[in-house]
Image (cartoon, grey):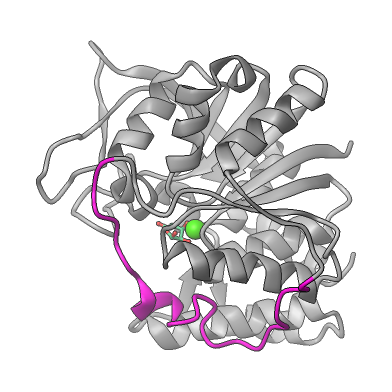
Amino acid sequence: MTRKVVIDTDPGIDDAVAILFALASPAFDVLGITTVAGNIGLTTVTRNAGRILALAGRQDIPVIAGAAAPLARKGFDTAEIHGDDGLGGVSFPEPDPTAPLWEGAPRWIAETLLRHPFGSVDILALGPLTNIARLVREHPAAAGRIRRVIAMGGAIDERGNIGPRSEFNLAADPEAADIVLRAGLPLVLVPLDVTRKVRATRDYLALLRRSERPPARVSADLIDAYFQSTTGGESRPLHDPCVMLFAERPDLFGIERYPLSVDLGDGVDAGALIKDEGRGAPVDVAMRVDTAAALDLLAGRLAGR
Ligand code: RIB
Ligand code: CA
């Protein structure tokens, strides 16, 4: 079944692989790409969304710029991981200057939800949750029409990648994460506990490179850049692609429901998820994955199968 989706993203190396997967898969009808400052600034992530669409020949899909900063804090800049251009220096075309490019992501998402039947649109969130939090606060009736929000974020038992327990997307905007977790949306979190199990090795890159299809070859270049920019290890986690993999094949994942709060303090673990029997909101969290099947699906779609 083809699902209508809005992709909210801060591309970003792994975001780019995730978006190329969604564009290559018959399971998704991508209504638009909304951008949020995260891995790098809003101008760069918005340009990158246009570059990815140009590479995939999908200039028809609108790009809508969203939040340039978190709700209440200074964000992070991870150019050291994603490169100054946010895509690891990998060659992409420039955005098509005639392609639809707008501003005001929360309002655009609300209008899109109102334009489509109730419960027919999924939101695939690959970055800080600032746009989704503003949608909930400024357009609550529209937010109530969302089918599912599937968001890469957080860590349950896994160590963090910002603080000992905090993960980048939630740590970049803890207030937004708190609003989204408490909004009563049909939300599935895909945390580091699962995304660190879906890993690309150099053999996997070689497999992608055997394809003649640009999405596969460019994804190999993106992941290779990821290898260059991060230290050590024989493999790299594919965080954001796990959101699309779950959206297309939830049967490859195992879900637990936890009562969760977000650390809103100013310490090293601001944005961390807290299991909180008393005050936590019940949230579905992907905790298990059939790694081999997920990686096969990703490589197959990128290669056009
Ligand atoms: O913690 C991983 C997340 O942070 C991913 O979305 C990656 O793109 C970065 O934004
Ligand atoms: Ca991201």
* Ligand 1 found in image quarter: bottom left
Measured as percent of width and height from the top left, residue 180 is found at 43, 28
Q: Tell me the magenta residue range.
A: 72-97
Indicate yes or no whether the magenta region holds residue 73.
yes
Residue 285 visible? The answer is no
Residue 147 appears in which quarter of the rendering? top right
Q: Is residue 226 above or below residue 242?
A: below
Measured as percent of width and height from the top left, residue 261 is found at 28, 26
| Residue at 57% over, 62% down | 15
| Residue 116 or residue 150, whichever sits in front | 116
Q: Is residue 110 shown left or right of residue 28?
A: left
Q: Is residue 124 above or below residue 59?
A: above
> Hey, which residue is sitting farthest top in the picture?
278
Indicate yes or no whether the magenta region holds residue 77.
yes
Q: Is residue 275 above or below residue 298?
A: above
| Residue at 26% over, 48% down | 166
| Residue 202 or residue 35, whichever sits in front | 35
Residue 104 appears in which quarter of the rendering? top right
| Residue at 57% over, 84% down | 202
Q: Main secondary structure of the magenta part?
A: loop
Residue 161 visible? The answer is yes
Q: Is residue 241 above or below residue 142?
A: below
Q: Is residue 39 shown left or right of residue 20?
A: left
